[in-house]
Amino acid sequence: MSVYQVEKLMEETRRVAAEFRKATGQTLPVGPELARYDANRLLNLESPPDGLSGVDAVSGDDLRYQIKNRVVFDDSKGGHRIGQLNFHGDWNVLLLVLLDEQYNTVEIYQMDRETAVEAVDELNNDTRKKRGPMSVAKFKALGSLVWDIDQGLLNAT
């Protein structure tokens, strides 16, 4: 299958997911695949070789990425969270791909593994919070913006 066909399929996936949510109020679990596809395409990353555990993408300079995503349907509502991180994986950079209500990528942030570990440890030590994922706001505060829809590629590692 050519790249053009995969691109068309991903665009159709975005359309179907947005229409499904509009019609039913429910979300289709396509965000992770769209996030991986967009991160690879927009940041010039590659799929990892077989046997590389917990890694969603790689780049030529020995960087290994775990990719998380969040579809933000209403910017005015706070408290958006990302899913659990896989600290058993062999990644050294964490990416957060933010998608809009049409499942289009609008921003990509990155954070190094050490910062992610410290952030999650801090959350786990906070007695007011249960063990759980990091918020999008926390990720944005600790990470750096590497791509956005208006400027394109910024300061990727």
Image (tube, rainbow, N blue to C red):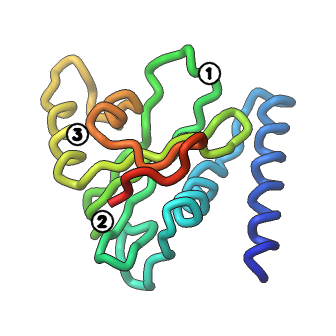
Looking at the image, is mark 3 or mark 1 nearer the viewer?
1
Task: Answer with mark 1 or mark 2, whichever residue precedes in sequence.
Answer: 1
Quadrant of residue 42 in the image? bottom right
Q: What residue is disc 2 on? A: 91
128 and 39: which one is in front?
39
* Crowd tier of the residue under label 2, counting other residues whose Cα lies within 10 Å: few below 14, some 14–19, many 20 or above: many
Q: What residue is disc 3 on? A: 120
Quadrant of residue 24 in the image? top right
State the separation of the CA atoms marked 1 and 2: 31 Å
Rendered position, 106 above or below 114: above
> In the rendering, which numbered label is found on residue 84?
none
Q: What residue is disc 1 on? A: 74
Q: Secondary structure at mark 1?
A: loop
Residue 1 seen in render: yes
State the separation of the CA atoms marked 2 and 3: 16 Å
Q: Amino acid at mark 2?
A: Trp
154 and 126: which one is in front?
154
**Residue 123 % position (x, y):** 21, 31
Q: Secondary structure at mark 3?
A: helix
Q: Is residue 10 left or right of residue 19?
A: left
